[in-house]
C-alpha cells in the first residue's frame, strides 16, 4: 500500500513524534526541530522529554560508576519513549554516540545518529576528506570523553580525515570562574585554524555560540542545527525486532529445562550471540492438566492463558508449551492471543508423515489425560495413521512412570520408571506399532529419541515431540 493510500490522497504527512534524551542544552535542539519541521510540514512536531526523575542523592541510591550510569539513564529514557509511542529517538550528545549501538540493540525505535548527520554534512562540504576540528563541551574539561572514546575516529577514518582537538592548555584555562566563554572559544578556534582545520565542529551547549564564532570568520559547523535538519529529513522505520521464543515453563519444571537444552543443541551457533532469545515463565503453579481432564479438578485454562499473555507482553513472537497434555487447552486460548502457539502435536504428526510415511500404526505413550482428550488422535489420524494406546494395565505403568513415587515428576529417570515405560512400549510394538511417540514431556528424560530402537524382536522409531518442537522453534527463529 502506498503512503498516499495509507494517509489518504492529498492528506498531510503524519506528524512525527520524537523522543529527545535531554540534559542542559537540549532545549536549543528542541527549538531547531520545531522550526525546521514546521517549515517542512506546516505543523509543529510532537517532542517528548523524559519524565522527571530523582537524582541519586534524592533517591537515596548509592553513587554509581558515571559512564555506566549515563548509559543506563539513556536506556531508561529510550524505553520510556518506546512505550509512549515515539517514532524516533534523538540523542544530541557526542559522548553518548560511543554506546549508541548498545542502546539500538535493545529497542525497535530508530535512534537518529548524531554522527550520521555530521558525517553526511562534512562529506558534503569536503568530498575528498580534510582536516576537521572537533570542539564540544567536554573538550573544556580534563575528562574529555569524546576524544577518549574515539567516536569521531570511527566515523572519519584517518585514511581520508585528520581530526584536530583543542590544545590541552585551553582546558586548564577553563577552570577559571567565571569562564570567559567567548574568549576561550575564539582561542580554541584560532588554535584549530592554525593547525589547518577546514571546518570546526561545535557541539552540545557550545553550539549556542556558533553564530558568534562564524561572525568572527571561523568555519564553524553547528552540530545541533545539522542534527535537527538531518532528523527532520531522515526516513524513519522501526528496527526489526529480534525473534523471541516464549516458553510456558513449569509444566513440568524438569521438562522445561530439557526443552531449553534441546533449543540450544538444535541451534547451529559458534558463539553465544548466535543463539536465539528465549523468554521463560517457569510457572509450576499451573493446575495439573491431567487431573482436570480426568477428575474435573481445577481448570488450568486461565493459568495457561495468563502465562501466555505475559510472554506476549514481554515481546515473544511465538509461544512453545513443552507439555503435551496442555495442548488440550490450546484451542481455547489461541483465539485470544496475538501470537501463535507452536503446536507440538501437529509438528509431531507432520514429522511422522514426512519421515515415516511408510508406517501405518503409531503408538502413543502419554498421560491418561492426553489420551482421553484425543488431541494426538486429532493430529495424527487425519495424516493417515492408526493410533495405538496402551491397554489399561500398561497405561497404569505409564502413569506410574510419570506420577508415581519413583516417577519422573518425583525426580527419577531410571529404575522403576524406566522399567514401567519399557514394558508399555514393548506392548505397543507387539501390537504392530512402527513409530512410538513419547507423548508426555517427562518421558524423554527416561528414554531418548531413537530412529531404530530394538524391542520385541524388531526395531521401532521413538519420537520425542519436545525435540521436534525445539527444532521447529529454531527454524522459525532463523
Image: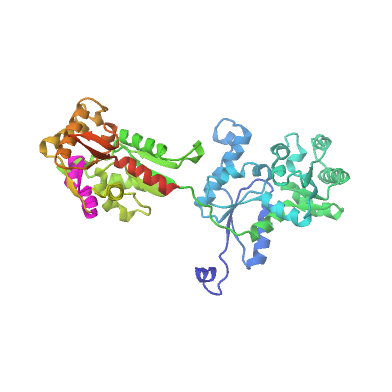
259 versus 196 height, above or below: above
373 versus 269 height, above or below: below
Q: Residue lying at the far bottom in this picture: please name it.
A: 10
User: Percent position (x, y) of residue 41?
Assistant: 63, 67
Q: Residue lying at the far top in this picture: please name it.
A: 415
Q: Quadrant of residue 432?
A: top left
Q: Quadrant of residue 431?
A: top left
Q: How is the image coloured?
A: rainbow
Is 302 part of what is drawn in magenta? no
Residue in the picture at 62% in, 41% down: 99
Start and end of the magenta stretch?
Answer: 359-383
Q: Residue lying at the far right in this picture: please name it.
A: 194
Q: Nearer the viewer, residue 224 or 198?
A: 198
User: Percent position (x, y) of residue 159?
Assistant: 76, 45
Q: Nearer the viewer, residue 13 or 460?
A: 460
Q: Is residue 338 left or right of residue 296?
A: right
Q: Is residue 138 left or right of residue 384?
A: right
User: Percent position (x, y) of residue 160?
Assistant: 77, 47
Q: Would you say residue 240 is visible in this rendering?
A: yes
Amino acid at each position: 500500500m502506498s503512503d498516499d493510500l495509507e494517509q489518504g490522497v492529498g492528506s498531510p504527512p503524519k506528524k512525527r513524534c520524537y523522543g529527545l534524551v535531554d540534559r542542559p542544552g537540549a532545549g536549543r535542539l528542541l527549538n531547531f526541530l520545531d522550526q525546521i519541521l514546521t517549515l517542512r510540514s506546516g505543523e509543529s512536531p510532537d517532542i517528548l522529554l523524559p519524565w522527571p526523575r530523582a537524582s541519586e542523592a534524592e533517591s537515596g541510591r548509592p553513587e554509581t560508576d558515571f559512564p555506566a550510569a549515563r548509559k543506563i539513564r539513556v536506556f531508561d529514557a529510550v524505553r520510556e519513549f518506546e512505550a509512549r509511542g515515539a517514532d524516533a529517538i534523538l540523542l544530541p550528545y557526542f559522548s553518548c554516540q560511543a554506546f549508541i549501538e548498545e542502546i539500538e540493540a535493545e529497542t525497535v525505535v530508530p535512534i537518529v545518529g548524531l554522527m550520521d548527520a555530521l558525517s553526511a554534512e562534512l562529506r558534503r562540504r569536503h568530498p575528498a576528506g580534510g582536516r576537521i576540528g572537533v570542539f564540544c563541551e567536554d573538550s573544556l574539561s580534563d575528562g574529555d570523553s569524546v576524544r577518549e572514546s574515539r567516536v569521531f575516529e570511527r566515523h572519519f577514518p584517518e585514511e581520508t580525515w585528520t581530526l584536530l582537538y583543542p590544545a590541552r592548555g585551553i582546558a586548564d584555562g577553563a577552570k577559571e570562574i567565571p569562564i570567559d566563554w567567548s574568549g576561550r572559544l575564539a582561542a580554541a578556534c584560532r588554535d584549530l585554524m592554525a593547525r589547518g582545520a577546514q571546518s570546526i565542529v561545535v557541539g552540545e551547549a557550545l553550539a549556542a555560540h556558533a553564530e558568534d564564532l562564524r561572525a568572527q570568520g571561523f568555519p564553524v559547523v553547528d552540530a545541533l542545527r545539522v542534527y535537527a535538519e538531518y532528523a527532520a529529513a531522515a526516513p524513519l522505520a522501526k528496527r526489526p525486532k529480534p525473534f523471541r521464543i516464549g516458553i510456558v515453563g513449569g509444566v513440568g519444571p524438569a521438562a522445561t529445562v530439557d526443552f531449553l537444552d534441546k533449543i540450544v543443541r538444535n541451534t547451529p551457533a559458534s558463539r553465544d550471540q548466535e543463539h536465539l532469545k528465549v523468554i521463560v515463565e517457569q510457572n509450576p503453579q499451573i493446575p495439573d492438566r491431567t487431573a482436570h481432564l480426568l477428575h474435573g479438578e481445577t481448570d488450568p485454562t486461565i493459568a495457561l492463558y495468563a502465562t501466555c499473555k505475559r510472554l506476549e507482553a514481554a515481546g515473544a513472537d511465538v509461544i512453545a508449551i513443552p507439555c503435551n497434555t496442555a495442548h488440550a487447552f490450546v484451542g481455547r486460548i489461541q483465539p485470544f492471543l496475538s501470537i501463535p502457539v507452536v503446536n507440538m502435536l501437529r509438528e509431531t504428526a507432520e514429522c511422522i508423515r514426512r519421515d515415516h510415511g511408510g508406517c501405518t500404526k503409531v503408538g502413543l505413550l502419554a498421560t491418561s489425560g492426553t489420551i482421553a482428550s484425543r488431541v494426538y488422535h486429532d493430529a495424527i489420524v487425519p495424516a493417515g495413521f492408526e493410533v495405538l494406546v496402551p491397554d489399561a494395565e500398561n497405561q497404569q505403568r505409564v502413569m506410574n512412570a510419570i506420577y508415581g513415587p519413583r516417577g519422573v515428576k518425583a525426580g527419577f529417570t531410571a529404575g522403576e520408571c524406566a522399567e514401567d515405560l519399557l514394558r508399555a512400549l514393548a506392548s505397543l510394538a507387539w501390537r504392530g506399532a512402527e513409530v512410538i511417540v513419547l507423548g508426555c514431556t517427562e518421558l524423554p528424560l527416561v528414554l531418548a529419541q531413537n530412529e531404530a530402537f530394538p524391542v520385541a524382536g524388531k526395531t521401532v522409531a521413538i519420537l520425542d515431540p519436545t525435540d521436534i518442537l525445539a527444532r521447529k522453534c529454531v527454524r522459525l527463529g532463523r
